[in-house]
Image (cartoon, rainbow, N blue to C red):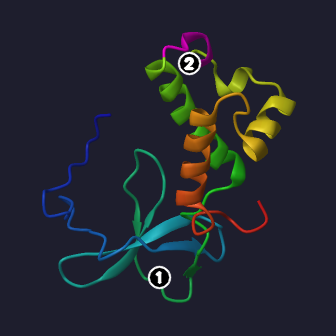
Amino acid sequence: MDSDFKEASDGIHEDGWFVQGAKRFMRNNETGDLGYCVMNRAGEEGVMLDRPNQRIVQTNIRGKWSDEPNAQKMHMPQLARICFAADKQLCTAMGDFKRAKRDWASLSDTERFLWTHTGPQNSTVRYALWTAIRDALLPETLVEGS
């Protein structure tokens, strides 16, 4: 995807704003906007709004933004879609092209629910992949109660 905005190899964007260390998400106390902490070369702090194809930095952030601990976490359906996408690739590699062509959106609600909670039931290799992905991502990446 092309962008009017380019990032230098040192992680500092051409407008001078950069993420210092791990990305820390924040939520605007008034609008609910999601963003992450950035800093410029002069040491000024700001929040870069988390919007696709937009580079909006808000400064003077003290008291207006709060930490958002769940921003990088995912919900169970997102985890299920990651497992499903990996399963499709595995099916392609195993020559099961009919299964590999399935699309998440074409599954019924019941099929999506079963996939989310029990994974593939007719293949030990596919089930092992589903389990490995879930084990690698749970519980640290999952929003509580999802």
Q: Position of residue 93 (x, y in %)?
A: 44, 22
| SS assignment at label 1 | loop
Tell me the amino acid under the disc marked 2: Ala
The answer to whether 52 is drawn above or below residue 99 in the figure is below
Numbered label tally: 2
Q: Tell me the mark number nearer the camera, choosing from 2 and 1.
A: 2
The answer to which quarter of the image holds residue 85 is top right
Residue at numbered disc 2: 100
Tell me the amino acid under the disc marked 1: Ile
Does the magenta-highlighted stretch encompass residue 97?
A: yes
Residue at numbered disc 1: 61
Residue located at (71% from left, 28% from top): 122
* Circle 2 residues within 10 Å: few <14, some 14–19, many ≥20: some
Badge 2 or badge 1: first in the primary sequence: 1
Does the magenta-highlighted stretch encompass residue 47?
A: no
* Circle 1 residues within 10 Å: few <14, some 14–19, many ≥20: few
Q: Quadrant of the N terminus?
A: top left
Q: Which residues are magenta?
A: 95-100
Residue sitting nearer the eye, 101 or 56: 101
The answer to which quarter of the image holds residue 65 is bottom right
